[in-house]
Image (cartoon, rainbow, N blue to C red):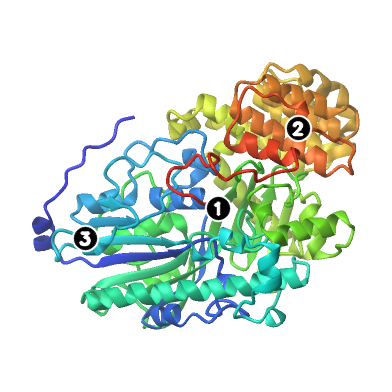
């Protein structure tokens, strides 16, 4: 990969050319906007964050493009949609190179003379290069810059609100009282209303007030240094969360984040058309955040990125307010596979599920460390759930449509409502065009991408664009009736292209018993030359009761030398084990894999009945101790 050479300018040259603002990002981990009263009824009081907003802007429609850390932060840093550049899996098995000619945005700031610091989480799925940060550590600060007149960009991340803060014990639940009264919280429509869920939510509201105190402390440091009125201060969440069905899921609770921007008096001319305290209705996404900082700093935007600035010279806020779309993506979360895309347009959220047979509640070790998750599952197993809370453990619809104004928790699917068909078809077509135009690399399984694409994912996508569009057409046969899709599936199951066979088997699984007539065409795929196609054939035939699937999947896991393929197969093992009324049990002693580590161990530990034997040695990323 060839990168453009860096020509670092001297600070004095930059400062003599133009005076530039500082920018500070204060980032709280794992919280959607639903936990701050400034954004949503029932949220915590956050006076420091509200004070930022009073001196600047509140963005009521800010979205992380992904509902999990590594993918979201990579999107922030690269200014590119993750499925286009190969960074969509949490966490990556192989880091993607940056697209040719594109660098992470702080590198452009450094080139322009800024001092760039990060304190301290990175968690990238792309190779950052050596010139992103002047300092990235838990001691990094603008105060360390060699020249006090040098402009700076500083990012700080805080885990007080992280998911792990809710990994309390049963003893703590019984003995410790949060400041917020659990009896007074407003529970989400998709949650069971139990004392444990109420306690968990009340405790999390306490954590949001801890974040608010951190915001106050950072602002006080800027003021003490005489820098506040020269500095744009952004506060936002790094993605949604964190109660069950938040982090890791592409509903509004997983991607709709709080965002306020304090506008400094000395640079208010860079914000065109809004008085302090204005609430912005336009949609902004994480791909836009880096371009916005570059625009504020007067740094030209690079070619090859997906984001657009929403602040800065030449960016009228009235035009920003006309933006009304946000794109979302979810793939593997640790050891749990799923493939979901979303398009939020105005008040409506459209979600397309490419593996709809997988329930949201499919086991994920890190999620189920939370007592509320485990209680939810126990209630499901005891047949004590109904209505919206029961949806979490059911197969998903192929497509969903929600009115986020009347249904903020996204529980009433309007996709089959005749009065919403025009909206459904419009958003479906918009998402289809977006995914094909990128193209979205997730039409190929991760095991295939690691083998064939990761040297240059963008170039690979461009070369394979026509083939990927063909795979998308097969995948979209899920949207038809089986009779309408049958000929497409028959042709694809007999194709010489393995990924066409792969998708045809997946579509069969989506149709379930309706696709039984294709059994004779799927059976030969049990011996397909591509092992991942075998996984999909086993999955379909097992789901309709035509074979005993677990011995075949176990054999694949034990024989493969590919850890990604092993995790893909184990995803099916756990689905069949947990969601078929005990018909397909497995034992840990059945498995003797050649590969180990990370996600393989997580699945096998769960099968063994001890998901958390140790937290050591499980994280592939060196940048964070937390997931």
- Residue 6 position, x and y percent, is 21, 41
Q: How many marks?
A: 3
- Residue 23 position, x and y percent, is 30, 65
Q: Nearer the viewer, mark 1 or mark 2?
A: 2
Separation of disc 2 and disc 3 at Cα? 52 Å
Q: Are marks 2 and 3 in contact (CB under 8 Å)?
A: no
* Closer to us: 315 or 588: 588
Question: Can residue 314 be seen at all in this image of the molecule?
Answer: no
Residue at position x 70%, y 57% in the image: 424
- Residue 144 is marked as 3
- Residue 68 is marked as 1
Q: Nearer the viewer, mark 2 or mark 3?
A: 2
* Closer to us: 541 or 333: 333
Helix, strand or loop for disc 1:
loop
The quadrant of the picture occupied by the N terminus is top left
User: Compared with residue 199, is residue 147 higher up or lower down, i.e. above or below?
Assistant: above
Q: Which residue is mark 2?
A: 588
- Residue 505 position, x and y percent, is 76, 30
* Closer to us: 393 or 82: 393
Separation of disc 1 and disc 2 at Cα? 29 Å
Crowding around mark 3 (Cα neighbors within 10 Å: few <14, some 14 to 19, many 20+) is few
Helix, strand or loop for disc 2:
helix
- Residue 90 is marked as none
Separation of disc 1 and disc 3 at Cα? 31 Å
Q: Earlier in the sequence, mark 2 or mark 3?
A: 3
Residue at position x 60%, y 57% in the image: 247
Residue at position x 66%, y 54% in the image: 369
Crowding around mark 1 (Cα neighbors within 10 Å: few <14, some 14 to 19, many 20+) is many
Question: Can residue 15 be seen at all in this image of the molecule?
Answer: yes
Crowding around mark 2 (Cα neighbors within 10 Å: few <14, some 14 to 19, many 20+) is few
Decide if residue 138 is on the left or right side of residue 326: left
């Amino acid at each position: 990969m060839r990168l453009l050479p860096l020509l670092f300018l001297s600070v004095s040259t930059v400062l003599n050319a133009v005076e530039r603002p500082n920018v500070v990002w204060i980032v709280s981990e794992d919280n959607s906007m639903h936990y701050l009263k400034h954004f949503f009824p029932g949220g915590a009081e956050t006076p420091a964050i509200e004070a930022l907003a009073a001196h600047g802007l509140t963005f009521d429609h800010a979205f992380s493009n992904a509902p999990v850390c590594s993918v979201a932060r990579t999107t922030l840093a690269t200014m590119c949609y993750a499925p286009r550049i190969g960074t969509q899996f949490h966490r990556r098995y192989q880091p993607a190179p940056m697209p040719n000619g594109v660098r992470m945005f702080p590198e452009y700031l450094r080139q322009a003379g800024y001092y760039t610091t990060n304190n301290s989480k990175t968690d990238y799925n792309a190779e950052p290069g050596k010139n992103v940060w002047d300092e990235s550590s838990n001691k990094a600060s603008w105060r360390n810059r060699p020249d006090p007149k040098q402009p700076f960009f500083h990012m700080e991340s805080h885990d007080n609100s992280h998911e792990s803060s809710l990994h309390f014990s049963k003893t703590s639940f019984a003995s410790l009282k949060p400041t917020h009264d659990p009896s007074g919280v407003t529970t989400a429509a998709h949650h069971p209303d139990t004392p444990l869920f109420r306690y968990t939510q009340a405790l999390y509201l306490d954590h949001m007030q801890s974040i608010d105190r951190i915001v106050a402390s950072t602002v006080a440091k800027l003021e003490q240094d005489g820098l506040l009125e020269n500095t744009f201060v952004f506060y936002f969440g790094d993605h949604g969360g964190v109660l069950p069905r938040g982090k890791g899921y592409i509903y509004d609770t997983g991607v709709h984040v709080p965002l306020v921007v304090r506008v400094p008096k000395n640079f208010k001319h860079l914000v065109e058309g809004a008085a302090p305290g204005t609430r912005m209705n336009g949609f902004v996404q994480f791909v836009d955040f880096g371009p916005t900082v570059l625009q504020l700093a007067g740094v030209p935007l690079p070619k090859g990125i997906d984001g657009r600035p929403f602040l800065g010279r030449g960016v009228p806020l009235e035009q920003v307010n006309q933006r009304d779309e946000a794109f979302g993506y979810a793939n593997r979360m640790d050891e749990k596979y799923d493939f979901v895309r979303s398009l939020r347009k105005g008040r409506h959220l459209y979600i397309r599920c490419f593996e709809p047979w997988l329930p949201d509640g499919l086991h994920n070790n890190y999620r189920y460390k939370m007592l509320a998750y485990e209680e939810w599952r126990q209630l499901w197993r005891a047949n004590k759930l109904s209505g919206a809370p029961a949806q979490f453990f059911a197969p998903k619809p192929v497509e969903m449509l929600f009115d986020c104004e009347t249904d903020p928790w996204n529980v009433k699917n309007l996709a089959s409502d005749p009065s919403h068909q025009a909206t459904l078809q419009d958003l479906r077509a918009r998402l289809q065009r977006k995914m094909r135009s990128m193209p979205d690399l997730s039409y190929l399984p991760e095991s295939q991408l690691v083998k064939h694409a990761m040297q240059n994912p963008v170039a690979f996508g461009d070369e394979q664009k026509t083939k990927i569009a063909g795979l998308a057409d097969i995948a979209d046969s899920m949207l038809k009736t089986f009779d309408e899709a049958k000929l497409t599936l028959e042709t694809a199951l007999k194709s010489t292209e393995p990924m066409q066979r792969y998708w045809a088997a997946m579509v069969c699984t989506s149709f379930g018993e309706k696709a039984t007539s294709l059994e004779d065409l799927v059976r030969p795929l049990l011996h397909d030359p591509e092992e991942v196609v075998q996984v999909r054939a086993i999955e379909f035939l097992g789901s309709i009761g035509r074979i005993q699937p677990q011995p075949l999947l176990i054999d694949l896991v034990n024989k493969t030398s590919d850890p990604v393929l092993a995790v893909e197969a184990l995803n099916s093992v756990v689905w069949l084990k947990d969601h078929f009324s005990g018909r397909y049990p497995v034992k840990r002693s059945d498995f003797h894999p050649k590969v180990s580590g990370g996600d393989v161990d997580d699945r096998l530990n769960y099968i063994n009945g001890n998901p958390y034997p140790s937290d050591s040695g499980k994280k592939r990323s060196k940048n964070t101790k937390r997931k």
